[in-house]
Image (spheres, rainbow, N blue to C red):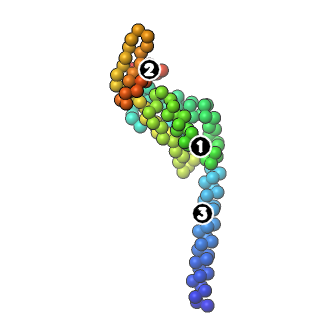
């Protein structure tokens, strides 16, 4: 009888861990996205504003604040943001509390070119970059 007690305890432990994992997984899956937090990696947001990034996330991708975490495709959001001419890199993530986070790295202009036809920047990677809509630089 003593050798069966160890096996029974092990079986109970496996069932308990399985139940807790299933409960936590289900609870995490039904959590809704509550808020959007945007941070700029390289300090000041001189060329693209928080409001612009927020509008890109909400309007163009139709992200609703109450959408389930399972239905949010983070890779598509990152690719969409990186297609913006002022954004060099975007990292999108979900927090444990259900918030959608974005860390944005802006392109850094190093040279401004002005000719009779147009005015534009070259960034630190040597790529052409348009003027900012914010009017700071």
Q: Quadrant of residue 24?
A: bottom right
Q: Dot 2: what SS?
A: loop
29 is higher (above) or lower (below) than 23:
above
In front here: 113 or 97?
A: 113
What residue do we see at 41% from left, 19% from top?
120
Residue 131: percent from left, percent from top: 44, 20
Q: Quick one: label 1 or label 2, which is nearer the N terminus?
A: 1
Label 3 to label 1: alpha-carbon separation: 23 Å
Residue 73: assigned label: 1
Asked whether the residues under the numbered discs 2 and 3 touch, taking CB atoms below 8 Å apart as contact, a structural biologist would say no
Residue 6: percent from left, percent from top: 57, 83
In front of the other: label 3 or label 1? 1
Label 1 to label 2: alpha-carbon separation: 30 Å
What residue do we see at 59% from left, 43% from top?
73
Disc 2 packing (10 Å; few <14; some 14–19; many ≥20):
some
> Residue under circle 3?
21
> Residue under circle 2?
131
Visible in this render: residue 32? no
Residue 49: assigned label: none
Q: Dot 1: what SS?
A: loop
Q: Dot 3: what SS?
A: helix
Q: Is 115 left, or right, of 30 in this rendering? A: left
Visible in this render: residue 96? yes
Asked whether the residues under the numbered discs 1 and 2 touch, taking CB atoms below 8 Å apart as contact, a structural biologist would say no
In front here: 79 or 108?
A: 79
Residue 51: percent from left, percent from top: 52, 29
Disc 3 packing (10 Å; few <14; some 14–19; many ≥20):
few
Disc 1 packing (10 Å; few <14; some 14–19; many ≥20):
few
In front of the other: label 2 or label 3? 2
Q: Quick one: label 3 or label 1, which is nearer the N terminus?
A: 3
């Amino acid at each position: 009888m003593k050798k069966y007690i160890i096996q029974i305890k092990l079986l109970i432990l496996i069932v308990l861990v399985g139940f807790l994992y299933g409960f936590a997984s289900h609870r995490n899956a039904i959590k809704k996205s509550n808020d959007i937090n945007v941070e700029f990696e390289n300090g000041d947001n001189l060329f693209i504003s928080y409001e612009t990034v927020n509008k890109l996330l909400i309007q163009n991708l139709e992200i609703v604040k109450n959408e389930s975490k399972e239905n949010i495709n983070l890779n598509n959001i990152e690719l969409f943001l990186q297609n913006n001419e002022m954004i060099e890199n975007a990292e999108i993530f979900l927090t444990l509390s259900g918030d959608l986070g974005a860390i944005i790295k802006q392109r850094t202009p190093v040279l401004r070119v002005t000719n009779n036809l147009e005015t534009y920047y070259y960034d630190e990677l040597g790529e052409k970059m348009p003027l900012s809509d914010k009017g700071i630089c």
